[in-house]
Image (cartoon, helix red, strand yellow):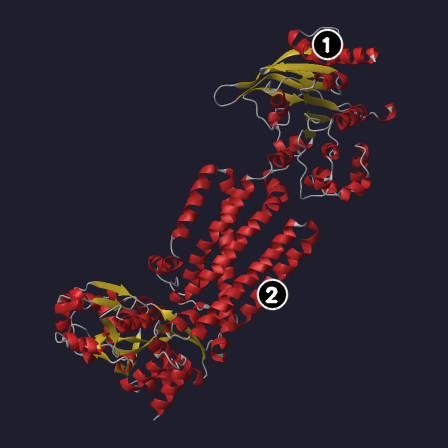
Amino acid sequence: MPAQTPQPGPSVAFDGVTKRYPGGVAAVDGVTLEIAGGSFVALVGASGSGKSTLLKTVNRLVEPSEGRVTIGGEDVAGMAPHLLRRRIGYVFQNVGLFPHLSVGENVAIGLRLTGERDGNGRVAELLRLVELPEEMAARMPDALSGGQRQRVGVARALATAPGLMLMDEPFGALDPVTRDGLAQAIRALHDRMGLTTIMVTHDMAEALLLADRVLVMEAGKVVADATPAQLLAGEGGAAAQALVAVPREQAKRLAAMERGA
Amino acid sequence: MNQAFARVPDLLAQHLLLAIAALLLGLMVSLPLAIVSARNKTVGRIALGFASLIQTIPSLALLALFYPILLSLSALVGGGIPALGFLPSLLALSLYAILPILRNGVTGLANLDPDVLEAADGVGMTPWQKLRIVEAPLVAPMLMAGIRTAAVWTIGAATLSTTVGQPSLGDLIFAGLQTQNWTLVLAGCTAAAALALSVDALLGLAEYGIAHRAKRWLVWASLGVLAAGVLVALTPVLPTQQRTVTVGAKGFSEQYILARLIGHRLEAAGYHVQYREGLGSGVAFAAVAAGDVDVYVDYSGTIWTNQMKRSDVPPRAAIVQGVADWARREHGVSLLGSLGFENAYAFAMRGDDARKRGIHSIADLARQAQEMNLATDVEFLERSEWRAVRDAYGLRFKSAHPYQPTFMYRALASGAADAIPAFSSDGRIAAQHLAVLTDPKGAIPGYDAILLIAPGRAKDAHFLEAVQPLVGAIPVEAMREANYMVDRDKDAVSPEEAARWLEGQIGK
């Protein structure tokens, strides 16, 4: 749908970003890199590698100890946190739907915060975007399945039409089938709306299949920065290749089993 | 029976207003405190510790403590702060209401799902929006449970506000306990329990409504019923006519009877009369001086020794005159006159026991006191009369225990005690064949019953005219008889009835 392609999302730049916790441990250690507007970037790494912390410096859920983060050239530290966050979609593993609000109210919360009247059409449109039936707006979150909840979470994040999406293990709690369906839906949304998307995941296969660019983190540092094609071609260094080896090995074994059958 | 319940509606209304006001004030303090406590661990620890500490103070003591606190505060700002009645009750009960609300609020906030809070931040809520849209609704059910607990505690403890001169259902309980009118006690307890259960049930419905979205109307319905109840309770209180007067009474039968006697005369003179009963000795005089009570009966010796701190014991008439001069000079309180009888502390023993031991005077008593037990009323051991008589005779008892006056007589009759400081106008002295010991050293002053009038009524001719006929009108025999009508174990009557009977006697 090229006619519908809007302005691409903003670029994001990290400049010497470090987050040190009391006790001196650096969760993020001097990360400098630039993410082009409209790209889909996956941040991959083991637990504790600092990928979530780095992601949260963008919407200031984490304040860096050193360095700065800019969105479209604008320093995030210069903006009021709540105003900044209303311009950024944020989706995370446990979704955090407001349990006392209906699905519709959850989706429309961003509009409510800015005082916009929700033309009922907006909620329905957002639900459609994440492939949920409109009638679901009246349901309460506890009546939804895990996959449906995460779709509502995505719809809620998209409500204020942000150009930038931050996703922290968005599929972490889902079963493989649901996970795959939602992942493809999100990639489709990303393309259709011209978003800039940064997604944290520990699953290299997911990163390879969804992202335009994969960043591998280890002990607070970015140790690899490559496209999926480059990684599959054996580039990107030892740490990245160790992560790529797992799904590749699995795929080989599955293929061998298929041949053997 | 009907008489006992006749006063319930009025007292119930007062009780409800006091409890609700205390609950609201408690909420106003504890809600912000809960929010701050949940955000700041140090504040939380201090606030919860303080609230728990207050909870360990017995409610009666907490109420009593506010009297001297407010009194000195009033003196500090040059007067005008009432130390009795509504204000101290309100403050003490509010303090009690804080703990359950604060604790549930803090616990509720601390246990909110961190993912939901992260989402609230993530979608761009300001701290205030987060509190209003997410935290408050999610904590509400837990908070409501705390408010229910606070409501039940407050309504229960409000019965004790009687002791600081705030009318409540406690008036019935204390009066009934004193005069052994169990119907009255039952009426007070039942009404207080019914009130507590009703308020709890209404708040429970509101709690259910908060927790269940589809039943949201329940919140408004139940709070509406509660608000309507408060409005109904307010109606008799609001039009405070100019002609409402307050008659005070301390916590024993004679005082209840005399209060009614005075009240009836004032009603006949066209006043709307309310009663503040069960006041402590010190509180009663302060109440009349402050105008919280318009008139009550005290005893010359009580004022002489306790308020004036005198330890000399001149003749009865000189004490009355001394009290009259002092009360007018120091507090603007008028002493209208003596009622005509004396109610002195008089040491009494079981008649047969006194004969057997050969005790006729306090001096005889002092020689054998080491092997005897003393039972007193609740305040005697703290009064200066006790110190005076103890030091004059060198009295040393094996044990000394305070009781409610009624139970003091019972303790003597049952042998649990061997001597008591009885009241000379008490009908039980004759009825229980007690031996009254003489006071050869004159250590106990005269206790003429005297009418004390608040400064504001000193020039109210209509008022004075209504109570003046009581001066010199009550012989001790009539008072003793009336007291006994209320205090006897069988066929006891209410102070109201005894007062009617006494009116008939005076008329003769």
The x and y percentages for residue B374 are 23, 67
Which tag is nearer the camera, tag 2 or tag 1? 1
Quarter placement of the C terminus of chain A: top right
The x and y percentages for residue B136 are 60, 45
Query: Which of the two residues, A139 or B15, is positioned nearer the viewer here?
Result: A139
Q: Give a yes or no on whether discs 2 and 1 share a subunit.
A: no
Q: Is residue B321 in view?
A: no
Residue drawn at (70%, 22%) of the image: A198
The amino acid beneath tag 2 is: Ala
The x and y percentages for residue A56 are 62, 25
Chain letter belonging to callout 1:
A
Quadrant position of residue A147:
top right
Quadrant position of residue B334:
bottom left
Q: Are marks 2 and 1 in contact (CB under 8 Å)?
A: no
Quarter placement of the N terminus of chain A: top right
Residue topped by disc 1: A231
Q: Is residue B477 left or right of residue B53?
A: left
Q: Is residue B457 left or right of residue A191?
A: left
Query: Which of the two residues, B195 or A255, is positioned nearer the viewer here?
Result: A255
Query: Which of the two residues, B261 or B307, is positioned nearer the viewer here?
Result: B261
Residue topped by disc 2: B228
Q: Is residue B6 in view?
A: yes
The x and y percentages for residue B485 are 36, 82
Q: Is residue B446 left or right of residue A182?
A: left
Disc 2 on helix, strand or loop? Answer: helix
